[in-house]
């Protein structure tokens, strides 16, 4: 099954979830858009961890790339997802400009949905350190984003 | 509590990105209720996240919107069916009346009375969730890159095979005469092959092991006709073709290759001769 088909399925699930749980949205806790972004992320993570997808991954003969080695994308270029970048700096470049440790934490915590406990185990560092470092990484990321606004 | 320290601790960023623990969430929601500065900080963080999401967004395929509404209608149909069993009179039996009734129900039910702004936000989020899922796409395109590399390698191999095939065909073709050009004293061990079509006198050249010509220099094939050297063509070392078509030469007695200026010379530079061979 093509990855774009997976993506489309997940997107449909996201919207359905939003629809079904809209009465659980509490405006005093945050903005609607952010609430929806988080639903999208969680749905995507559930999908990536799902049995069905995990089995498909095992059946692939080509092993996953470590995308840390991808070259940065220049403005105006077409990146490897086929999207022409018209903005000056993409999020990917911003993340790549950060310390390796911080990149790794953002990758594990945000994009792969590992908990702090799991990250601590995986990287063999104390939970407290994971927490502080992740926080620092996020603050730095936010600062970098602001600089390019 | 030191509010400034709290705001710069990164907990707010973690919260809006969905990375805070239950406990941390409770604390933050309590603090922000009582502190305007924290409330503002949370709002700012959300706006940053939302701006980034919109920026990174990729336009989704057009058919998705319809597919999503279809799914929602299906969902609503299921749940309103359950409700109507408990409550009101039966829904009309025929299917054409069913669909509009459901849509109306969706529009009017109180749970979903933020229908319009949701529709707007929904289209925005559709765009946003693809950004989050760019992770998935990135994985696949990494695989695509690997695949492309393998395919390219295969193409090189196929090309090399074709080159050899060409040479072989020339060599074994009875209509073609093969002339081996051997290295002169200055360039021992050098070799080149000239193929001459017996009927058309069309010549072909393959440099076997001659080195890459320096910049602005090029190998030129000379044919000796009636004792005099005749220009038989230039060899292009950039082309990637091993066997190259030269000129048609009648009555060639011998061939030689000399290194000349790029583009060729009207007369051969004897000191730069590399190989020669007689027919």
Image: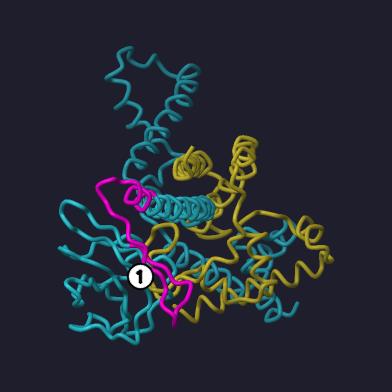
Chain colours: A yellow, B cyan
Q: Residue furthest toward the front?
A: B227
Q: Where residue B227 appears, x then y in whole percent?
A: 20, 75
Q: Quadrant of residue B97?
A: top left
Q: Residue furthest toward the top?
A: B93
Q: Where residue A83 appears, x then y in whole percent?
A: 38, 60
Q: Is residue A63 magenta?
A: no
Q: Is residue A18 above or below residue B222?
A: above
- Of residues B192 and B228, the one nearer the viewer is B228
Question: At 51% from the left edge and 66% from the top edge, which residue is drawn?
Answer: B49
Q: Quadrant of residue B196?
A: bottom left
Q: Within 10 Å of the Cα at label 1, are there few (<14), some (14-19), or many (20+) other Cα atoms?
A: few
**Any part of residue A8 in sight:** yes
Q: Quadrant of residue B94?
A: top left
- Of residues B30 and A72, the one nearer the viewer is A72
Q: Quadrant of the N terminus of chain B?
A: bottom right
Q: Is residue A140 above or below residue A125?
A: below
Secondary structure of the residue carrying tag 1 is: loop
- The residue singled out by tag 1 in the image is A86
Q: Is residue B181 above or below residue A39?
A: below
Q: Give the magenta range.
A: B165-193
- Of residues B210 and A42, the one nearer the viewer is B210
Q: Where residue B88 appears, x then y in whole percent?
A: 42, 18
Q: Quadrant of the C terminus of chain B?
A: bottom left
- Of residues B121 and B19, the one nearer the viewer is B19
In-image side of A26 versus B34 (left or right)? left
Question: At 40% from the left edge and 43% from the top edge, which residue is drawn?
Answer: B113
Q: Where residue B203 appears, x then y in whole percent?
A: 23, 61
Q: Is residue B166 magenta?
A: yes
Q: How many marks?
A: 1
**Any part of residue A36 in sight:** no
């Amino acid at each position: 099954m093509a990855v774009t088909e997976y993506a489309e399925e997940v997107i449909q699930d996201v919207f359905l979830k939003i629809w079904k749980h809209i009465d659980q949205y509490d405006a005093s806790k945050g903005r609607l858009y952010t609430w929806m972004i988080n639903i999208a992320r969680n749905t995507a993570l559930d999908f990536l961890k799902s049995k069905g997808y995990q089995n498909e991954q095992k059946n692939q003969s080509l092993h996953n790339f470590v995308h840390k080695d991808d070259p940065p994308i220049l403005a105006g270029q077409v990146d490897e997802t086929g999207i022409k970048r018209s903005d000056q700096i993409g999020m990917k470049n911003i993340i790549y400009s950060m310390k390796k440790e911080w990149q790794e934490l953002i990758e594990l915590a945000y994009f792969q949905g590992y908990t702090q406990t799991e990250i601590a185990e995986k990287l063999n560092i104390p939970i407290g350190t994971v927490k502080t470092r992740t926080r620092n990484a996020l603050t730095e990321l936010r600062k970098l984003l602001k600089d390019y606004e | 509590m030191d509010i400034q320290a709290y705001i710069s601790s990164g907990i707010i960023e973690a919260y809006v990105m969905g990375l805070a623990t239950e406990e941390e969430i409770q604390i933050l929601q309590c603090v922000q209720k009582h502190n305007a500065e924290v409330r503002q900080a949370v709002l700012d963080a959300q706006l940053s996240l939302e701006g980034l999401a919109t920026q990174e967004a990729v336009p989704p395929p057009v058919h998705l919107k319809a597919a999503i509404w279809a799914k929602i209608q299906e969902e609503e149909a299921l749940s309103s069916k359950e409700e109507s069993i408990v409550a009101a009179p039966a829904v009309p039996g025929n299917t054409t009346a069913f669909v509009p009734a459901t849509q109306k129900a969706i529009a009017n039910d109180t749970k979903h009375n933020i229908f319009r702004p949701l529709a707007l936000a929904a289209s925005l989020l559709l765009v946003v969730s693809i950004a989050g899922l760019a992770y998935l796409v990135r994985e696949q395109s990494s695989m695509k890159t690997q695949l492309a590399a393998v395919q390219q390698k295969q193409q090189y191999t196929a090309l090399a095979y074709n080159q050899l095939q060409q040479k072989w065909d020339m060599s074994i073709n009875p209509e073609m005469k093969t002339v081996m050009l051997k290295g002169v004293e200055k360039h021992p061990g050098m070799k080149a092959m000239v193929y001459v079509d017996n009927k058309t006198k069309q010549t072909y050249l393959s440099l076997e092991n001659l080195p890459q010509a320096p910049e602005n220099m090029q190998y030129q094939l000379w044919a000796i006709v009636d004792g005099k050297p005749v220009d038989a063509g230039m060899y292009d070392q950039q082309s990637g073709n091993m066997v190259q078509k030269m000129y048609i030469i009648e009555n060639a007695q011998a061939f030689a290759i000399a290194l000349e200026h790029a583009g060729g010379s009207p007369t051969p530079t004897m000191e730069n001769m590399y190989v020669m061979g007689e027919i």
